[in-house]
Image: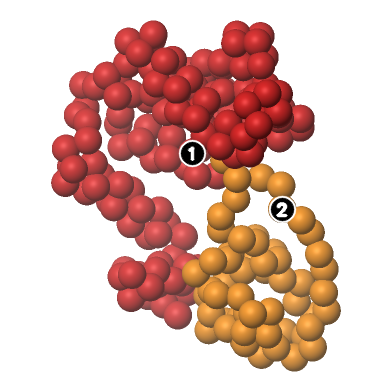
């Protein structure tokens, strides 16, 4: 339930897949969220988007 | 990516099935998967009384929701481990979840019922906290289920 937060700015990642590659993350291991919608790998990102990347595994 | 069922925009990709799903068809898909797994492994039946250990996290609460939607009679048990705000948050979320759905939640408090918390147990047994926690949780969940007369 408690994940460390960090915010970074990424310029022109293009797609969700490209963003995850840039962050060295595997798409099955995270949820990519824009506003209240989940995004699949192929979704194009806009320069002003605020994206939340949340690990799917947490303590319990 | 499109939803395999309705061709609307997919919100999740399930690589194992090589498919994408929109929100509502993903929920349907998960319900079907859980129902099939219960049936394939002969896990329990519609008449069994089930108890589910919940942490307040998304995994256990989602399973509680799914089993309830599938028609099973499931009560929850929350083990209060005495781990600072983690335990308080988990209990609050579990209570809120149960109350919103009119479900029954029993709370076992390690501190008041058994005289120790997980951080204390880890210190006293010289085990890593995860080891002390894993052993204690398994025993206490089994004990609570047996005491309360659940089938599963």
Is B61 located above or below residue B31 in the figure?
above
Q: Which colour denotes chain B?
A: red
Instruction: Say how the picture is coloured.
Output: by chain
Q: Is residue B92 visible?
A: no
CA distance separating discs 1 and 2: 18 Å
Apparent side of residue B10 relative to residue B99 in the rendered image (left or right): left
Secondary structure beneath dot 2 equals loop
Residue at image position (58%, 83%) is A17
Q: Mark 2 points at which residue?
A: A3
Q: Can you see residue A33?
A: yes
Protein chain holding label 1: B
For the C terminus of chain A, the image quarter is top right
Taking B86 as reference, is B46 left or right?
left
What residue is shown at x 37% (from left), y 60% (from top)?
B25
**Helix, strand, or loop for circle 1?**
helix
**Residue B111 position by quadrant:** top right
Q: Residues within 10 Å of mark 2 (few under 14, many from 20)?
A: few
Give how far across and how far down residue B26 sits, in percent.
40, 59
Chain ID for label 2?
A
Q: Which mark is residue B60?
A: 1
The orange-coloured chain is labelled A
Residue B125, picture quadrant: top right
Residue appearing at x 59%, y 39% in the figure? B130
Could you say which disc has been placed on residue B83 in the image? none
């Amino acid at each position: 339930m408690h994940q460390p937060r960090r915010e970074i700015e990424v310029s022109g990642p293009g797609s969700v897949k490209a963003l995850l590659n840039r962050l060295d993350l595997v798409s099955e291991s995270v949820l990519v969220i824009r506003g209240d919608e989940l995004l699949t790998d192929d979704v194009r990102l806009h320069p002003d988007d605020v994206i939340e990347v949340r690990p799917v595994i947490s303590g319990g | 990516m499109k939803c395999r069922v309705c061709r609307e925009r997919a919100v999740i990709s399930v690589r194992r099935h090589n498919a994408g799903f929109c929100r509502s068809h993903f929920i349907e898909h998960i319900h079907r998967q859980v129902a099939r797994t219960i049936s394939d492994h002969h896990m329990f039946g519609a008449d069994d009384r089930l108890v589910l250990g919940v942490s307040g996290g998304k995994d256990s609460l989602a399973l509680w929701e799914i089993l309830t939607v599938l028609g099973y009679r499931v009560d929850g048990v929350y083990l209060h481990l005495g781990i600072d705000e983690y335990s308080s948050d988990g209990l609050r979320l579990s209570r809120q979840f149960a109350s919103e759905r009119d479900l029954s939640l029993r709370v076992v408090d390690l501190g008041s019922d058994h005289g120790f918390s997980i951080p204390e147990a880890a210190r006293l047994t010289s085990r890593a906290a995860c080891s002390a926690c894993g052993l204690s949780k398994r025993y206490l969940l089994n004990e609570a289920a047996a005491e309360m007369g659940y089938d599963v």
